[in-house]
Structures are given as structure tokens and as C-alpha cells.
Image (cartoon, rainbow, N blue to C red):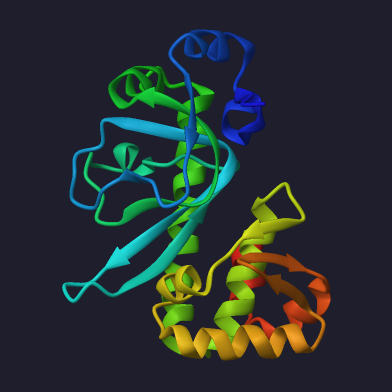
């Protein structure tokens, strides 16, 4: 069920603020690979995920991609609208399908400028997302593909409600910015250790502690 208060930002609003927003929140489904916000475009609609995960992806001129952030039900897609500009330079693409509450960007700005708890919550979330993006960028430059794969899978697991989730090797390679063959070898090695179960494009983490042992320190930094 697409319930607005499944999103932690909306759930934290006062009753008065929530009532002012509720009639302007449109429940929508977000499909796998759907682009919610394109890089370089003006942001017109914002999304509060209630289920599913959205990736912030940096794309190079040659078409190569690297994920720099994840947004689940703890956050909002389009936060740059409230951080000094209405344009983002990362693509927001659905990585795990689900549901969200969509709202007009200008309408939400009116509420944001009331000096309300929404302003405090969005500003606080914006800082957390900035820290996550910064840490992921550093991780992509300094840690092995195996460590990054473990970190990324743990971040996904923290944000999904189901025990299993869709995960193709192509998607994994695009998010990590590495060749598909390298990702395949690493996923197979982790599976052989009994840490994950990966079959027919679906992933399940069987041993989180073992996966955390493989991941670099970035996972704990981001999680905290």
C-alpha cells in the first residue's frame, strides 16, 4: 500500500503540516529503470519514496556511469531544489521498483519557506545525502570492486522491505562503473562463500556479518 507516512520525512511532519500537504501528494508507482529526474534539467516534481530505491547516477560523456547515492523511504528525490538551485547534475533513476508520493516542486517550496519542521527535516536530510554522496565518491576512487560491491549491497538491503530484490549483473556493473565480467566474478565468489544467494536476477543476503566484513569502512560511515 502506498501510504505517505511510510516515507520517514513525511511521517516526521506535524499533524498541521501533514494536512496542508496531503491533498497535494499524488501516489505513483515508480518502475525499474524509470528516470525520475534527468541530469541538467529543471526540477518540476519531487518524490518521497514509500517503497523501492532510487539511485543518483553520474554519467560521463562516453556513456559510462557510476552511482554516487541511494535514496529510499528515508529521503526525497530532488533535494537540490532546496539547496540553492532547481537543477541537478545527477540522474535520478529507479533501481528497485516501488511506490512514491509525488508533489509539485513549487508547491512544496511554499511550505518549506514557512519556517516549518519540513524545512528543518529537508535541510537535515540534504546534509546527510551530501555526506553520503561524498563518501561514495571517495569509496569509488579508493576501494576495491569487491569492497564496493559489498558496501552497495548492504546499502540496498538497509532500504528494501523484501528479503530478496531484483539485481542484474548489468545493473550492478553500471552502478559500480566497472565491467560486467569483473562484477560477475565477484558476485560468484561471494555466493560460493554462502554470503548471498543470487539466481535469475534476484539477490538475497544470507550472512550480513560476513558481507560487512568484506565491505570497506565507508558502509559504517554512511550508515551512521
Q: In the image shown, does 163 or 202 lie closer to the viewer? A: 202
Asked whether the viewer can see residue 224, the reply is: no
**In which quarter of the view is residue 108 placed?**
top left
Q: How many marks?
A: 0
> In the drawing, does residue 162 fall left or right of residue 143?
right
User: Within the image, what quadrant is residue 77 found in?
Assistant: top left
Which quarter shows the C terminus?
bottom right
Residue 221 on image: x %, y % = 62, 69
Could you tell me residue 51's position as x and y percent?
61, 39
Quadrant placement of the N terminus: top right
Furthest residue toward front: 200
**Residue 117 appears in the picture as rendered:** yes
105 left or right of 142? left
Identify the residue shown where x is 39% and y is 51%.
93
Residue positioned 60% across, 66% down in the render: 201
Where does residue 200 sit, x and y in percent of width and height? 64, 68
Q: Residue 65, located in which quarter of the rendered image? A: bottom left
- Position of 126 relative to 64 (above/below): above
In front of the other: 220 or 167: 167
Q: Is residue 101 above or below residue 70?
A: above
Would residue 196 be found to the left or right of residue 124 on screen?
A: right
78 sits left or right of 201 in the view: left
180 or 161: which is nearer to us? 180
Residue 80 placement (x, y as % from top left): 32, 44
Which residue shows up at 65% across the image and 25% down it? Answer: 5
Q: Residue at x 69, y 71 (%)?
A: 199
Amino acid at each position: 500500500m502506498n501510504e505517505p507516512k511510510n516515507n520517514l520525512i513525511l511521517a516526521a511532519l506535524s499533524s498541521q503540516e501533514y494536512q496542508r500537504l496531503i491533498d497535494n501528494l499524488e501516489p505513483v508507482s515508480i518502475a525499474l529503470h524509470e528516470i525520475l529526474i534527468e541530469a541538467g534539467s529543471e526540477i518540476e516534481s519531487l518524490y518521497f519514496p514509500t517503497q523501492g530505491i532510487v539511485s543518483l547516477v553520474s554519467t560521463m560523456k562516453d556513456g559510462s556511469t557510476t552511482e554516487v547515492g541511494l535514496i529510499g523511504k528515508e529521503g526525497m528525490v530532488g533535494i537540490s531544489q532546496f539547496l540553492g538551485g532547481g537543477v541537478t547534475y545527477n540522474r535520478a533513476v529507479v533501481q528497485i521498483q516501488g511506490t512514491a508520493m509525488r508533489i509539485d516542486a513549487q508547491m512544496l517550496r511554499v511550505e518549506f519557506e514557512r519556517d516549518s519542521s519540513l524545512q528543518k527535516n529537508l535541510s537535515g536530510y540534504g546534509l546527510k545525502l551530501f555526506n553520503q554522496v561524498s563518501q561514495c565518491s571517495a569509496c569509488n576512487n579508493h576501494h576495491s570492486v569487491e569492497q564496493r560491491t559489498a558496501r552497495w549491497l548492504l546499502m540496498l538491503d538497509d532500504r528494501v522491505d523484501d528479503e530478496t530484490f531484483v539485481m542484474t549483473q548489468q545493473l550492478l556493473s553500471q552502478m559500480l562503473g566497472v565491467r560486467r565480467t569483473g562484477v560477475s566474478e565477484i558476485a560468484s565468489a561471494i555466493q560460493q562463500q554462502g554470503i548471498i544467494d543470487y539466481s535469475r536476477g534476484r539477490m538475497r543476503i544470507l550472512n550480513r556479518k560476513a558481507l560487512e566484513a568484506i565491505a570497506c569502512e565507508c558502509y559504517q560511515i554512511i550508515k551512521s
